[in-house]
Image (tube, coloured by chain):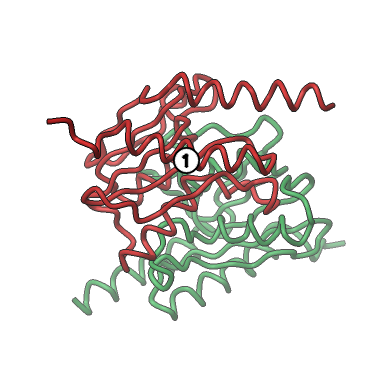
Chain colours: A green, B red
Amino acid sequence: MENPFDDVYFMKKALQEAEIAFDKGEIPVGALIVIDNRIIARAHNLTELLNDVTAHAEMQAITAAANFLGGKYLINCTLYVTLEPCQMCAGALYWSQINRVVYGARDPERGCIALNTKLHPKTVMVGGVLEDESAQLLKRFFIEKRNLN
Amino acid sequence: MENPFDDVYFMKKALQEAEIAFDKGEIPVGALIVIDNRIIARAHNLTELLNDVTAHAEMQAITAAANFLGGKYLINCTLYVTLEPCQMCAGALYWSQINRVVYGARDPERGCIALNTKLHPKTVMVGGVLEDESAQLLKRFFIEKRNLN
């Protein structure tokens, strides 16, 4: 039987968050945090609206999930994010001791893999889930942005 | 003539923030952000109180300074922090394009230098300002913590 709660299912939900960011004129990245197949945090990039470089989707999701759990460690949690985390977000994930990180599009320039950010030994990272959809949304954003300027 | 607004002057103020963290039972790290010799953000570590791994002193200072300036880039600003920034905070500083980062104690295990976190090309980093005072405060915190348990 098909598992309705697989990585693709949750990444689709993260993509919905990215689309909300898109509609607000933000670089479209969405994230959510799941524990036992339950979504406990949803967030999208808000760096422009909040005038704050720290307002990446992942950072907000980490804060919200810890708030929900009443503890700062995200044990047994999975983060879904439409774009490979940057150094800042991977650094925050290190501190959170999160169990799994699943991302969509790769970021070979500013992503944590190329920049070799250290993850917590407890954390497993999986990439490329709905990679094309996530990358297409980002591409569409930057094309529209360029045409507006 | 002596400059009253040198790095030691501002690091002393950052140390005062670290002492406030100490009194709250937080790992004692303090930070401030300065522009044109004017302090525009003060913060101290609040990870325990807020149950949030992202609540490092530097992260809060970056958010507060951007809020004060009305823009997310911390051009012409200097961050003073009593402990070498971690990957997360150095990653946030990368996005902020801050001009200077001055830190006190070194963190050879989890600091951004050993972990090779990428800084923005516009950012100059200087370490070891009031290093002993910052390190002593941290040491005292961990000794007291150990004795309580």
Q: Quadrant of residue A122?
A: top right
Question: In this view, which residue lies farthest toward the front?
Answer: B1
Q: Quadrant of residue A27?
A: bottom left
Quadrant of the image for the C terminus of chain B?
Answer: top right
Q: Is residue B109 above or below residue A13?
A: above
Q: Which residue is at a point 79% across and 57% down the rendered structure image?
A: A69
Q: Position of residue A49 (x, y in %)?
A: 41, 73
Q: Position of residue B2 (x, y in %)?
A: 17, 30
Is B115 situated left or right of A103 in this image?
Answer: left
Q: Chain of mark 1?
A: A
Question: In this view, which residue lies farthest toward the right?
Answer: A1
Q: Which residue is at a point 24% across and 44% down the rendered structure image?
A: B99
Q: Which residue is at a point 63% across and 37% down the rendered structure image?
A: B22
Q: How many residues crowd mark 1 within 10 Å: few (<14), some (14–19), many (20+)?
A: many
Quadrant of the image for the N terminus of chain B?
Answer: top left
Q: Which residue is at a point 57% across and 52% down the rendered structure image?
A: A103
Is A19 situated left or right of B118 in this image?
Answer: right
Is A134 situated left or right of B40 in this image?
Answer: right
Name the residue beneath numbered marker 1: A112
Name the residue nearer the viewer: B85 or A91: B85
Q: Is residue A135 above or below residue A143?
A: above
Q: Which residue type does callout 1 highlight?
A: Cys
Q: Position of residue B117 (x, y in %)?
A: 41, 33
Disc 1 secondary structure class: loop
Q: Exactly how many numbered labels are in the figure?
A: 1
Is B78 situated left or right of A14 in this image?
Answer: left
Q: Is residue B32 above or below residue A22?
A: above
Q: Position of residue A65 (x, y in %)?
A: 71, 58
Q: Quadrant of residue A40?
A: bottom right
Name the residue nearer the viewer: B82 or A35: B82
